[in-house]
């Protein structure tokens, strides 16, 4: 066990020592764990959920133009915490790993991530954005993009959530069974 520990830690110490400007005290490798369907975790999602729902539902209830395609009014959506957790975890992963994509580092798609939070979806959509935005500028920007606008106006979705982590925004929209 001790020799296995040394085989793992020694290269990490050498690599870190070569790159660090600070003196090393101890390096403990992180424990890799996967979020499971019934996981409970704390997260800080610093946005105004009420305002986001008002802005989204204003477009949905009145209808709008997605580029040159008129989208008729559709039912309003409700906030869903499972979708929020999936969105927040994706925003965090994109920020922590410095990438921007609907595909996760492990190859996951939005449906995989939503399912992992225990949401049994029939249909889903995902919008992502990057930048120093407010709730209003986020929704306005998404609605000015034909693809994002059509996702927001999908008549088959009934729930949504938006998450923000270090200027990485993810919106999940879905309907459950």
Image: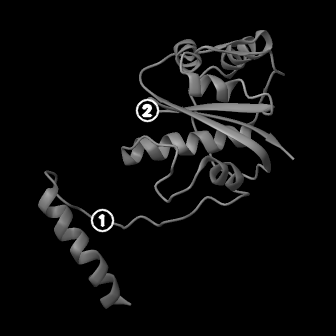
Dot 2 surroundings within 10 Å: few (below 14), some, or many (20 or more)?
some
Image coordinates for residue 159, horizontal then vertical, percent: 77, 32
- Give the mark, 2 or 1, whose residue is nearer the N terminus: 1
Left or right position of 94 against 17: right
Which disc, if any, is residue 7? none
Dot 1 surroundings within 10 Å: few (below 14), some, or many (20 or more)?
few
What residue do we see at 68% from left, 13% from top?
55
Image coordinates for residue 104, horizontal then vertical, percent: 50, 51
- Image quarter where the N terminus lies is bottom left
Left or right position of 133 against 47: left
In this rendering, the answer to whether 28 lies above or below 169 is below
Residue of label 1: 27
Q: Nearer the viewer, residue 16 or 22?
A: 16
Image coordinates for residue 151, horizontal then vertical, percent: 66, 29
The kind of secondary structure element at disc 2 is loop
Image coordinates for residue 142, horizontal then vertical, percent: 56, 21
In this rendering, the answer to whether 16 lies above or below 97 is below
Q: Nearer the viewer, mark 2 or mark 1?
A: 2
What residue do we see at 47% from left, 18% from top?
133
Residue 28: name its quadrant. bottom left
Residue of label 2: 166
Residue 123: name its quadrant. top right
What residue do we see at 61% from left, 13% from top?
68
Left or right position of 37 against 165: right
In this rendering, the answer to whether 100 lies above or below 162 is below
Q: Nearer the viewer, residue 52 or 40?
A: 52
Q: Residue furthest right?
A: 177
Q: Nearer the viewer, residue 18 or 79?
A: 79
Estimate the spatial distance between the alpha carbons at disc 2 and disc 1, rounded to whole Å: 26 Å
């Amino acid at each position: 066990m001790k020799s296995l520990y040394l085989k793992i830690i020694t290269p990490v110490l050498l690599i870190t020592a070569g790159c660090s400007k600070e003196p090393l005290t101890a390096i403990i490798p992180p424990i890799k764990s996967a979020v499971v369907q019934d996981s409970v975790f704390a997260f800080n999602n610093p946005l105004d959920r009420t305002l986001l729902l008002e802005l989204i539902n204003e477009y949905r209830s009145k209808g709008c133009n997605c580029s040159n395609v008129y989208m008729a009014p559709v039912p309003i959506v409700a906030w869903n915490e499972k979708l929020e957790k999936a969105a927040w975890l994706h925003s965090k992963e994109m920020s922590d790993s410095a990438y921007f994509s609907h595909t996760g580092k492990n190859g996951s798609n939005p449906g995989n991530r939503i399912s992992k939070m225990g949401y049994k979806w029939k249909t889903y959509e995902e919008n992502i954005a990057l930048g120093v935005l407010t709730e209003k500028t986020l929704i306005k920007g998404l609605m000015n993009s034909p693809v994002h606008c059509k996702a927001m106006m999908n008549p088959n979705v009934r729930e949504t959530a938006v998450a923000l982590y270090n200027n990485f925004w993810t919106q999940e929209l879905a309907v459950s069974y």
